[in-house]
Amino acid sequence: MSVPLGQRVRVAVEHGSIESVSLTRGAGVKQLPGTTGADGLTWVSRSHLTPGATYALNVKAVSDEGNVKTLESAFTTQDLSKDQQTFPSFFPTSGSTVGVGMPVIIKFDLPVRNKKRFENNISVVTAPVQEGGFRWISDNELRWRPAKFWHAGTKVTVKANVGGVPAGNGIFGQTDRTLRFNIGRSLISRVNIETHQMRVFKNGKLINTIPITTGRQPEHTTRSGVKLIMEKYRTKDMNSETIGIDPDSADGYDLSGVEFAQRITSSGEFIHAAPWSVGSQGHANVSHGCTGMSTSNAGWLYGQTIIGDPVIYTGSNRPMTLTNGYGDWNVSFADYIAGR
């Protein structure tokens, strides 16, 4: 028989109690966990049935008279096309070590309308325990961040048990997935746009102060707020067209092989080596919005950072926003989980 999706398996007995339940998927390859009620009369699977799968159910029960009875059943679930299934992708990647600011990012290739139902089937477990919560960035992206920066050395396990969960509009979660990653040491950089200095703190201790230059004001003002290291490039070509400036104009640029480039916003802000502006570093803001420093300082910083390290900017009236890269720390935790 074919069983519709969007439900859990439920076993109930009368005039006796459940002794054991085995629910397996795919020729017994995967055992699905479940919970037996305190009265021993019911058993419910902890996850939904996944699309297009074959299940085997084995129930052993004991009657009030002490007789043991066994029930065996097999069934398949409703099959779906790919355009009826939304697949969850994780970032950071499994097994990776990231900075203390890194949120959990779950992207779905098809939109999720039943957001609360999906949230209820996703868990984030941390060791040590830290308070945190979800925020939907869009119908296709869900994030989770702790209330405060991660404790250094935290181990994180994310379980997205969304296989078979109704996403809305006839779409279901495609499969269950698990992510495990680690938080590294604490490395937090603080940039003062007005004094043209970056201070770098490792595990709370100041380890370097770097002269920098940021965006020329008012036309290229660097944003204030909390940014995270998003990507790292030993060298990167940079063209002003990517930030809306004609590279052939007087204000344009087309640079090859910029060294030690680290992305901190989706809109195009980087930290990178800027040997052409060393004379202004520590004294004036002359860039198109990026944070420039000497090649030696940029190389040193590049060797210190990992994805998810916070870089906190102060000193301008242009704010960083939640959705400009990993901007999750630019709203209060209360507003973050409230979706405001």
Image: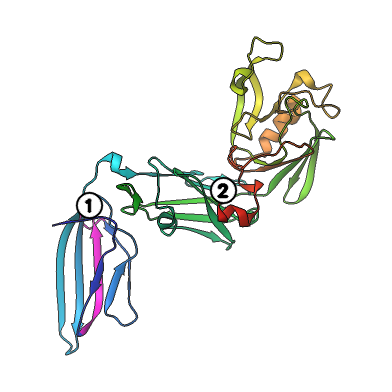
Q: CA distance from mark 1 to mark 2?
A: 32 Å
What's drawn in magenta, residue-wise?
16-29
Report which residue position mark 2 lands on: 103
In the image, is residue 27 part of the stretch drawn in magenta? yes
Residue at the bottom extreme, as displayed: 65
Q: Is residue 202 above or below residue 42?
A: above
Image coords of residue 147 (percent x, y): 62, 57
Q: Is residue 300 above or below residue 330?
A: above
The residue that appears at 71% across and 27% down in the rendered structure is 289
Image coords of residue 217 (percent x, y): 78, 27
Q: Quadrant of the N terminus?
A: bottom left
Give 141 or 26, whichever is nearer the viewer: 141
Report which residue position mark 1 lands on: 53
In the image, is residue 62 part of the stretch drawn in magenta? no
The residue that appears at 73% across and 22% down in the rendered structure is 274
Q: Principal SS element in the magenta part?
A: strand
Q: Is residue 205 left or right of residue 100?
A: right
Image coords of residue 62 (percent x, y): 20, 82
Q: Is residue 100 above or below residue 62?
A: above
Image coords of residue 157 (percent x, y): 48, 55
Q: Which of the 4 quarters of the picture holds residue 229?
A: top right
Dot 2 amino acid type: Pro
